[in-house]
Image: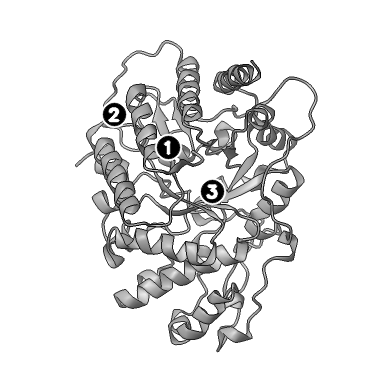
Amino acid sequence: MTNRNFELERRDAIRLLGLTITGGALAACGLESNHTINSPTSPTTSPTNLPTTNPSATEASISQTEPVATSGPPTLRTLSDDVGLKFAVLPMPSRLWLTDYRDATLQIGNELIGDDLACKFVYRDVDWRQVLNHWDLIQEEFSQGRTAFENQIRWDPWNRNYGYMAGFVDFAAENNMTICVDSLLWSDDVPESVREGNFTRNELRKIAEFMLKNKLIMFKDIVREWSVISESPARHLWGDWHSAFWERNLGYPDIVYDAFRWARDVAPDARLNLMEDHIDATDESRARTLQATLDLLDSMNRNNIPADGFSFENNLWIYAPPQWDEVRDVLQRIRSMGYLIGHAQTTVVLSEVWPIYPSRQRTVWNVSDKLAAQADIYARLLQEYLEVDGDFGVFGVSDQDSWYQEYGADDADPLLFDRECQPKPCYDALVQVLEARLAEIRE
């Protein structure tokens, strides 16, 4: 089926957390030319020999944003603070040292999407047989709120000297931003040692629990919002044994239920979200994924699974814009189930052919002003999110961050700032939406 490829589009080449920050020709390897990988640490014989403390740089938790003192015209950041909107942005940490890029990032959001904790990199040196052999001791460590096998885990896997989570913690603290982290578990983010380890179902379940709980415990005092599992409905529908690794090996929706229960065990106060791609049903495959997502949320509700919210990625296209009455209905249905609407990872693609699978059909054939069409979609989507008290967000800062480039779509230009870090009409459109909302609040 031609549409199945779209269901598995989820940044297979770059969204693996360590890869998204590198850019350039070496992005596929997760490395930049001046970066080297740490040499492996020596395996430990017992998890009780290992350090269990959280990073010293993160002692003080970042629980809520505070307005940043600014002068000049309002920005998305200052307006979001004024109207009480959580606006998340995922920057490329390797570019944050560039003044224009850093300034653009700070004009957009009051929350960072932390994206440098990929299991396939963070846990690539773990001796899984030792983990399984010491499972009772590991469970004891977890019950005490401590990490296990700490010296086998690479919290900074690329040795970039940015610190934990690629410097996001320090950047957030310096700029009064909260942090959310995506994809605690994601079927495309599985270490090769796990994929090829010949483990039983029960052993894989323990490994999944180990990976999820260690990340949560390590950052529980800094990160207050997590996407616990990503794209599970789509993987269940369309994935094979590789792309739907957890769903195929541990069962669906079993892995979703387990992931949220594990997360709540060690992070009782965190906000826990489910994440999926499609808010719009503009073709058959998107419609099926959306329906499967709603069915899953309903079943989680009925089975008292401890989930707080739901986040759509919102990868949209000007040649197949959402049907706004359907978007409104979906958001309201999710809210009526008792879930919060979590941060988005919005992109709006300008390419005349959909980058992920070129056979995707348009619903709009002629677009006279692409930037205006992009701005309209961004503005309408934000309006719908505001109506349900949802959070919002974007996956990147400038068009040079576009993950669609990994599919050869150099013309996607899906973000709020252009390649020179200048605001685009879509940025101005979002500012106007928030200015209107602020005027309503002040009346």
Crowd class of label 2 (few under 14; some 14 to 19; many from 20; radius 10 Å): some
Q: Secondary structure at mark 2?
A: loop
**Mark sitting earlier along the chain (3/2):** 3
Query: In the image as oriented, which residue stretches furthest toward the bottom?
Result: 45
Q: Secondary structure at mark 1?
A: loop
- Which amino acid does the dot numbered 1 rest on? Gly
Q: Which residue is mark 1?
A: 408
C-alpha gap between disc 3 and disc 2:
28 Å
Query: Hey, which quadrant is residue 243 in on the image?
Result: bottom left
Amino acid found under the numbered disc labelled 3: Thr
Q: Which mark is residue 67?
A: none
Rendered location of residue 73, percent (x, y): 73, 19
The image's mark for residue 282 is: 2
- Label 3–label 1 contact, CB within 8 A: no
In which image quadrant can residue 258 be found?
Answer: bottom left
Instruction: Return the residue nearer the eye: 78 or 105.
Output: 78
Q: Closer to the camera, 83 or 24?
A: 83
Q: Give me the residue at 57% from left, 71% from top.
A: 153
Residue drawn at x 67%, y 58% is 160
Q: Crowding near pointer 1: few (<14 within 10 Å), some, many (20+)?
A: few
